[in-house]
Amino acid sequence: MDWFMTVWPWMGLGAAIVLLILLLATNWLRSDTSVSRWHDLTWISWLATVAYMLHNVEEYGIDFTGATLSFPDLMSGLMGSTPESGFFLAVNLSLVWVMGPVAAILSRKYTAMAFGMIGIEAINLLTHIPGAIAMGNIKAGFVTAVVIFLPMVTWAFVGLTGSKATMRRSILWAYIGIGALYHVALFGTVSMYVNGIWNGNGMGIWMLFAGAGVFTLWLWYAKRIHRSTAAESPA
C-alpha cells in the first residue's frame, strides 16, 4: 500500500487535467447552459472536485517548497509518528475521488449538492491559514488552499448565494457546518492515535464511516432544499 502513496496524487492530477479540459472546452459537465459557467452549480461542483485534486498534489505529491509527502510529514511531527498509509488514502480517496464526483453528478437534480465540497474546502482553508501562521511555513497544502480554495469559497458567498442568486446564503452556511462536522471527526482520530487506541488503519475506517455520514447529510439537505423549492414554484 505504501507504494500507492507516491502514485495516487499524480493519478488525481491526471484526472484533474482531463476534467479541466472538459470543464473549459465542452458543456458536458454543465447542467444549465443558459447561464455562464461560473453560475452553473453543476459546473462549480465539478470545479470544486478538481480544486481538491490539485490540493492533494501539494499535500501528498510535491509542495511549493519542493518537499514531497509534506502533509504526512507534518502529521508525523504533530503526532510523534506517521499513521499507516491506509488513513491518508481512506480520507482522500473517499472524499475527493468518490464523494466529490458523485455530488457533482447529483447536483444536476439536487443543486445544493454543489456546496458539499465547497463546505469541506471552507473549513480546510480555516485550518491551513492559522496552522501556517503558527508554524511559520507554507508547507502541506497552504498555497493551494489560499490560491484555489479561498477564491472558490468567496465566489460561493458573493456570486452563487444571496439576494441576487437563486440559492440562499443559509444553504451555503449549512454545508459549511457539515464540513465542520467532517473535520471534527477527522481531528478526533488524532487523539485516538496519540493515545494508542487506534492505528492508522483504524483511523481510516472511522473516516470512511464519517464520510458516508457526511455525504448522507449532504444529500438529505439537498433533497430538502429541492422539495421546498419545488413547492414554492408556481404550478
Image (cartoon, rainbow, N blue to C red):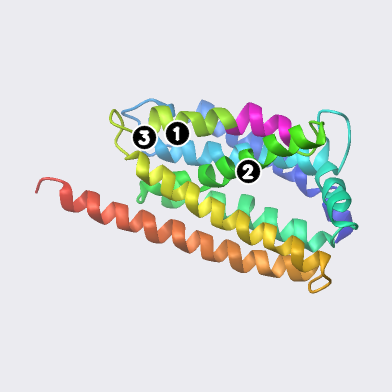
Identify the magenta region.
141-149
Quadrant where the N terminus sits is bottom right
Q: Which residue is mark 1?
A: 156
Residue extending farthest bottom: 197
Q: Which residue is mark 3?
A: 161
Rounded to the nearest angstrom, the CA distance separating label 3 from label 1 is 6 Å
Q: Is residue 144 left or right of residue 38?
A: right
Label 1, residues with CA under 10 Å away: few <14, some 14-19, many ≥20: many
Callout 2 secondary element: helix
Closest to the observer: 119 or 68? 119
Rounded to the nearest angstrom, the CA distance separating label 2 from label 3 is 20 Å
Of the image marks 2 and 3, the number of the one nearer the N terminus = 2
Closest to the observer: 40 or 133? 133
Callout 3 secondary element: loop
Measuring 61% from the left and 69% from the top, which residue is drawn there?
A: 209
Q: Which residue is mark 2?
A: 124
Closest to the observer: 100 or 148? 148
- Residue 156 in magenta? no
Residue extending farthest front: 134
Label 3, residues with CA under 10 Å away: few <14, some 14-19, many ≥20: some
Measuring 10% from the left and 45% from the top, which residue is drawn there?
A: 234
Callout 1 secondary element: helix
Residue extending farthest left: 235
